[in-house]
């Protein structure tokens, strides 16, 4: 009674090649202004009426503070490792000196008893 008709579906578009994606990335550029160095004192107070520029200033400042924090954290961890290594070296040197002192005391005691 009813005849099936062939549905014509347009073929799916081909995904871009790697070369096309790299070419597109070269054309991409950021439209917002470069971040200015902001200190905690001159950061704008954000409200619902704040401009987009104020929001970007606060965002850039928080990203900068986060990067500084990560740098300080990494530096502190490296210093902690160096301190532990130095402590181990000093302990090894102390043990060696104590062993030499004990040997000298044993020799001295042996010499005195003769």
Image (cartoon, rainbow, N blue to C red):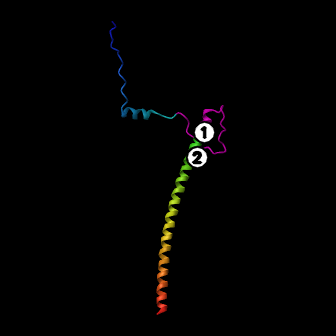
Tell which of 13 and 90 is nearer to you: 90
Residue at left 58%, top 39%? 59
Residue 81 visible in the displayed image: yes
Residue 28 is labelled as none
Task: Name the secondary structure under disc 1.
Answer: helix
Task: Name the secondary structure under disc 2.
Answer: helix
Label 1: which residue?
57
Extreme residue in the top direction: 1
Q: Is residue 111 magenta?
A: no
Residue 65 is labelled as 2
Q: Which residues are magenta?
A: 31-55
Residue 9 left/right relative to 75: left
Q: Position of residue 104 (x, y in %)?
A: 48, 83
Depicted 2 relative to depicted 103: above or below: above
Tell which of 27 and 93 is nearer to you: 93
Q: Main secondary structure of the magenta part?
A: loop
Q: Are marks 2 and 1 in contact (CB under 8 Å)?
A: no
Task: Judge the density around disc 1: few (<14), some (14-19), many (≥20) Cα neighbours within 10 Å.
Answer: some
Tell which of 114 and 51 is nearer to you: 114
């Amino acid at each position: 009674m009813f005849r099936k008709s062939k549905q014509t579906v347009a073929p799916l578009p081909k995904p871009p090649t790697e070369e096309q994606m790299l070419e597109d990335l070269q054309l991409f550029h950021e439209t917002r202004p470069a971040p200015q160095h902001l200190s905690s004192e001159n950061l704008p107070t954000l409200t619902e009426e704040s401009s987009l520029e104020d929001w970007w200033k606060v965002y850039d400042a928080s990203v900068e503070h986060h990067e500084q924090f990560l740098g300080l954290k990494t530096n502190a961890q490296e210093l902690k490792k160096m301190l532990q290594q130095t402590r181990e070296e000093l302990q090894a040197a102390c043990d060696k000196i104590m062993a030499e002192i004990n040997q000298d005391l044993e020799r001295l005691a042996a010499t005195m008893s003769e």
